Image (tube, helix red, strand yellow):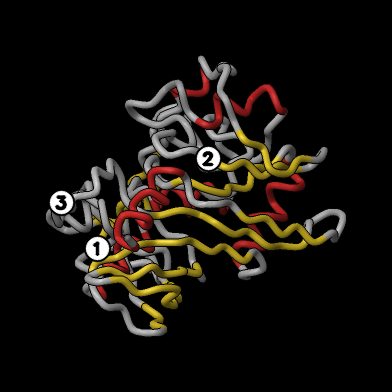
Amino acid sequence: MDVVVGADERVGSRAEAQRLIDAERVRVNGALVAKRFSVRAGDTIDVTPVERHATLGLEPQAMALDVRYEDEHLLVVDKPAGVVTHPSRGHDSGTLVNGLLALGIAGGDEAFRPGIVHRLDRDTSGLLIVAKNDHAHRALQEMLRVREIDRRYKALVHGDFPPALTVDQAIGRDRKNRLRVSTNTDVPRDARTRFRTLERFERFSLLEARLDTGRTHQIRVHLEFAGFPVVGDQTYGRRPNSFGLLRQFLHSWSLRFDHPLTGAEIDLQSALPDDLQGVLDAISA
């Protein structure tokens, strides 16, 4: 078995290896494979390391942030819509990480996203946990893995949604459009979301979504798959609306977990931002 890695790079941990696979930077005999794929003698594994350019100039930037909880180990921030969680291609500055650097965020194997335990899409608002040290980061990621962090979102969708629905459908990068995630993928990853209806309107339903896994765009993709796309979602919804909404109606409204180091219960909620509340007011009138 031959392993080919970019010059002067190495895969330093199991978690890093998993992230490289998730980022589609690992190929076996020239093909993308799932993490559960078993290699055999004679296979060639090609690894393209994650670009580290963003680590070199990562600087704190002044940003108006609503920190809802903070101690020496972690913080919870209420992220506004329009802010990218961490640096990536095309977003080397102005990210949430840049705004939080002055608060001492740290932890994890990737220097360009210190402290980030989970992420929210740029145009998804709401509560997000960030670590301040490696110990807290490792503990929080393990809690996510074993589903000990209760994360709930509010979403407004097109259609008359059933009282409750669980979507247990693997997703990954779409075969035809690499900018989309879908069920039509060569590298499926298990994904499970539980939905319940909070309120019904004419032609729309307000839902609560609970994540059992945390895949990229999971809620949006599962709702498109179920036939109830998120209002305002131009990637997975693509339906016109008359509310003037400039983003998807998706908000991380509730986080509940036991502090990984102190054991104290942390239970936080975030009200809908004005743009989303305005849509609800309009359809309720």
Image: 24 above or below 197: above
Residue 144 appears left or right of 10:
right
Q: In front: 254, or 39?
A: 254
Residue 8 appears left or right of 100:
left
| Amino acid on which the number 2 mark rests in the picture | Lys
Image: 230 above or below 247: below
Q: Which residue is mark 1?
A: 182
Q: Earlier in the sequence, mark 2 or mark 1?
A: 2
Image: 7 above or below 125: above
| Amino acid on which the number 1 mark rests in the picture | Ser
Q: What residue is drawn where x is 35% and y is 64%? A: 34
Mark 2 or 1: the one toward you: 2
Q: What residue is drawn where x is 42% and y is 59%? A: 215
Q: Is residue 177 visible?
A: yes
Image: 117 above or below 5: below
Q: Which residue is mark 3?
A: 177
User: Callout 3: helix, strand or loop?
Assistant: loop
Q: What residue is drawn where x is 57% and y is 62%? A: 151
Estimate the x, y position of residue 99 in percent, counting from the top left. Answer: 57, 25
Spatial CA span between label 2 and label 1: 25 Å
Spatial CA span between label 3 and label 1: 9 Å
User: Callout 1: helix, strand or loop?
Assistant: strand
Q: Which residue is mark 2?
A: 79
Residue 184 appears left or right of 199:
left
Q: Earlier in the sequence, mark 3 or mark 1?
A: 3
Q: In front: 31, or 258?
A: 258
Please state, as top left, top right, bottom left or bottom right, where the N terminus lies in the image. Answer: bottom left
